[in-house]
Image: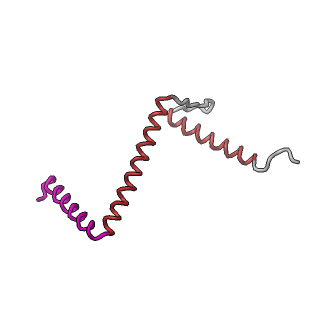
Amino acid sequence: MSKFKPGAFVKGIEAQKLQEQEQLRKRNKYKIESDDVVIVEKNNIIKFLVLLLIRIIKMAATISVIVLAIIGVLALLYPASREILLQYFYKVLLEIQMFVGIR
């Protein structure tokens, strides 16, 4: 049996390149010129909570957009709801025109 696992060398090189790219991104972020410095970002609870809140907001926005798109498609498929939807669009358009001062 061989001493090395197949593909282990390639995975090591890929991990090393990924780490170098990450260090380059961090050097650019913190404006550090020296290559001798290894930047380690430590996570804290505030940063974690902010990132979590951002993810929750993004997920809620995505779900809302999908639900509204489904409602819009269903409203356009059925004739009765299509007519009501077009009436609301017309009313909104009139209100926007009045607000801007076109009419």
Residue at x-position 52% and y-position 37%: 28
Residue 89 percent across, percent down from the top left? 23, 61
Inspect the magenta stretch and tell me whether residue 88 lies in it.
Answer: yes
Q: How is the image coloured?
A: secondary structure
Residue 62 percent across, percent down from the top left? 41, 51
Question: Observer-nearest residue: 44 or 12?
Answer: 44
Question: Observer-nearest residue: 73 or 36?
Answer: 73
Q: Quadrant of the C terminus?
A: bottom left
In the displayed structure image, the side of residue 78 where residue 33 appears, left or right: right
Question: Observer-nearest residue: 25 or 68?
Answer: 68
Q: What residue span does the magenta drawing correspond to?
A: 78-103
Magenta stretch, main secondary structure class: helix
Residue at x-position 38% and y-position 56%: 67
Residue with the most extreme bottom position: 79
In the displayed structure image, the side of residue 49 where residue 65 appears, left or right: left
In the displayed structure image, the side of residue 98 where residue 48 appears, left or right: right
In the displayed structure image, the side of residue 91 where residue 77 appears, left or right: right
Q: How many marks?
A: 0
* Vertical side of 75 occupied by 55: above or below: above
Inspect the magenta stretch and tell me whether residue 79 lies in it.
Answer: yes
Residue at x-position 43% and y-position 38%: 53
Residue with the most extreme left position: 103
Report which quarter residue 84 is drawn in: bottom left
Residue at x-position 85% and y-position 44%: 3
Residue 10 percent across, percent down from the top left? 73, 48
Report which quarter residue 94 is drawn in: bottom left
